Image (cartoon, grey):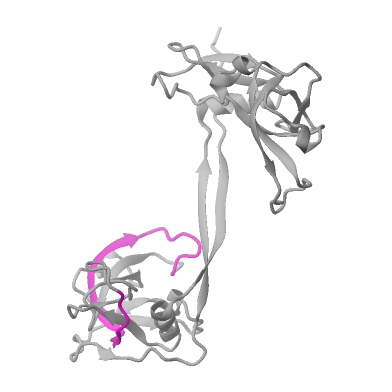
Amino acid sequence: MTAASPPEVLRAPLVVEFPFTRSLGPVQSAFLTGLRQRAVLGVRTSDGRVMVPPAEYDPATAEEIRELVEVAPTGTVTTWAWNGEPRPHQPLGTPFAWVLVRLDGADTAILHALDAPGPDAVSTGMRVRIRWAAERTGAITDIACFEPYGGRPEEGGAAPHDGVFADPVTGIVAEARLDYTYSPGRAQTAYINALSERRTVGERCPSCHKVYVPPRGACPTCGVATTERVEVGPAGTVTTFCIVNIKARNLDIDVPYVYAHIALDGAGLALHGRIGGIPYDQVRMGLRVEPVWTDGGRYPDHYRPTGEPDADYDAYKELL
């Protein structure tokens, strides 16, 4: 007789993304507008250093910096790392090097991509120059990448610049995105699988005996693994709640509605859920509720009153 194999731990691709919109002050506006015009601007600090990319405040003294200067589009690699597997939306679709380049006339380095045939073609101290994008909009991507360059460093240093351009860039939208594969682990896989059967399962700590729902695989208080599974609920008690008055995007729920912490019977930790089946202004601490499932739903759609008398405060005060 062979032992049953453990259930497969769940895994799924997950994407977290949001557009970050920010306005630009005079320094960053001049820098990005300059890139659109194929000019690289930096700032000169009170001690004479030239910072590229420019900062609005001196990192050493915290004083405001406004003296703009133009540096050369050529420079020297100060350090680098090879990227053999470019990800989507990175500067180049073929393997390339991430490089820090100190442009001629600057005292700090700028991070960007270097188009090179392989890691053997990259070295600290090598000379490079900017390859400009064919279409420029006033963004860091106006620098398509750096490319190897055989010329010597330009002399003369940074030249003063008034930072004045026609139609300056005053704001940007940065698309922040993170793609990864998420696994809830052994404990939460069992929890999710039980929810698909309309059961709520937690795990009990062998030391303090508290039942965690959702389970975490270990007790955060005692620091020991939890393996004993315990079915809790289905009913529970509202411990605390809030009234939501702002409608979330892509959420088909009319406002106002109530979101609550609910201590399921037998659980040592409250979980959260939406309260329905009762006017929002009648939800209260101690209200006894039960889950409502939709056809095919893998988790409760909301919780509704059971009709039982409210729980005594002493019965749930430790779970607030």
Q: Residue at x 78, y 16 (%)?
A: 308
State the residue in front, 121 or 267.
Answer: 267
Instruction: Decide whether residue 66 is among the magenta residues.
Output: yes
Q: Quadrant of the N terminus?
A: top right
Q: Quadrant of residue 83?
A: bottom left
Determine whether 38 is above or below 289 in the image: below
Q: Quadrant of residue 258?
A: top right
Determine whether 106 is above or below 93 in the image: below
Q: Position of residue 198 (x, y in %)?
A: 72, 23
Relative to residue 254, is residue 269 drawn left or right?
A: left
Relative to residue 198, is residue 179 drawn left or right?
A: left
Q: Quadrant of the C terminus?
A: top right
Instruction: Decide whether residue 258 is among the magenta residues.
Output: no
Q: Residue at x 70, y 54 (%)?
A: 249
State the residue in front, 150 or 252.
Answer: 252
Q: Which residue is the extreme one toward the top? A: 1
Relative to residue 127, is residue 198 drawn left or right?
A: right
Q: Position of residue 148 (x, y in %)?
A: 29, 78
Relative to residue 152, is residue 110 drawn left or right?
A: right
Q: Position of residue 3 (x, y in %)?
A: 54, 11
Q: Position of residue 94 (x, y in %)?
A: 43, 66
Q: Residue at x 29, y 80 (%)?
A: 43
Q: Is residue 211 visible?
A: yes
Q: Which residues are magenta?
A: 64-91
Determine whether 139 is above or below 80 in the image: below
Q: Is residue 8 visible?
A: no
Q: Residue at x 45, y 22 (%)?
A: 218
Determine whether 56 is above or below 136 in the image: above
State the residue in front, 91 or 280.
Answer: 280
